Image: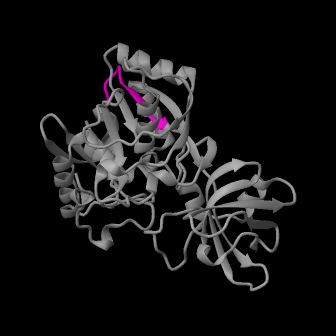
Amino acid sequence: MKIADFDYELPGELIAQTPLAERDASRMLVLDRREQKWTDSSFKEFTRYLRPDDVVVVNNSRVIPARLIGQREGSGGQVEIFLVREIEGNDWEALVRPGARLKKGSRASFGDGKLIVELLDEPGAEIRRVRFQCEGSFDDTLAEIGSTPLPPYIKRPSGVSNTDRERYQTVYSKHRGAIAAPTAGLHFTPEVLGQVAEIASIAEVTLHVGYGTFEPVRVDDVDEHSVSSEHFEISESAAETINNARARGGRVVVVGTTTMRALESSSSEDGRVVAGKGVASLTIKPGYQFRIADALLTNFHLPQSSLLILVSAFAGREFILRAYARAVSQRYRFYSYGDCMLIL
């Protein structure tokens, strides 16, 4: 199967540039896999599709202010650092611009010298290894001078706003470490979560969204693509809640592709979620046999992306592409701040 098979046309004006005034005001396209039909709905109707024995599973990872803009020592030229993964101490993997011109040992400063970075390797690899120096806590310094890492397709004259710091987090985010939001969860409010809890169970897992989630697919043959690993953790209580729901005949309603990847990566051969810390190295493609997920709430994804491939594996490529065409024709809002899709 070729990556070109996962393409679709999207008018640029349908890419959501800002969040809606209310989180739960998004539209929701509901897909019935068995009937191969869809219904135009709204996220406020989400709980109508739940059953008493279901469990709704969310990713409680919290986004860090992973984008830094500063000046190169000596020349004063602009340097942008996008944190990708913490290695140890204050050493990180990062995307660096202009990475090709910054040699090993190059240094840059951020926040009027509050944070210094040194490049530890030579140019060549897309992701560089860097080391930070600062007075006091690195986390506190990053919180002060870093900015919310909005996706590159969000293009505003004013750039990142103060609103983004709050709206580009889920209301249930807890454990810091993600460099992008698990966007399917952005639609939930405390009120909606309360309504969910009145009907079904809720379980939280943690997968820190990393570069693998949005890394471009660089091969023509989908079978040759591998998604970079991401770390996840599932508590004993979360695993028990999910497994008990399945034992009662309830459905596992997965909120977001990152949650899906954590659950499927943790599954045993007999279809149970195994508690613990792990590394999600699973690449979900058409033909994959899902062990845990019964339903999926997800946003609309970029053409030719690993996330669109994952959703197509869950619901069928042709059905998904027809549903995407429907969403385009009905002027749904796309991507991180956009509308959502519930696949049953």
Give the x, y percent position of residue 274: 49, 22
Q: Is residue 186 above or below residue 190?
A: below
Q: Quadrant of residue 232?
A: top right
| Point 16% across, 53% down: residue | 322
Q: Is residue 32 above or below residue 4?
A: above
Colouring rule applied to residues: one colour
| Front one among 84 and 38 | 84
In this orientation, does residue 27 appear?
no
Q: Quadrant of residue 4?
A: bottom left
Give the x, y percent position of residue 110: 75, 71
In this orientation, does residue 16 appear?
yes
| Point 53% across, 56% down: residue | 167
| Point 54% across, 65% down: residue | 126
| Front one among 220 and 56 | 220
Give the x, y percent position of residue 1: 22, 51
Quadrant housing the C terminus: top left
Q: Is residue 127 above or below residue 123?
A: above
| Front one among 68 and 231 | 231
Total count of labels: 0
Q: Is residue 329 left or right of residue 241?
A: left
Q: Is residue 164 left or right of residue 253?
A: right
Is 221 a magenta residue?
Answer: no
Magenta span: 50-58
Is 52 a magenta residue?
Answer: yes
Q: Is residue 178 left or right of residue 272?
A: right
In the displayed orientation, state which residue is furthest to the right: 135
| Point 34% across, 31% down: residue | 293
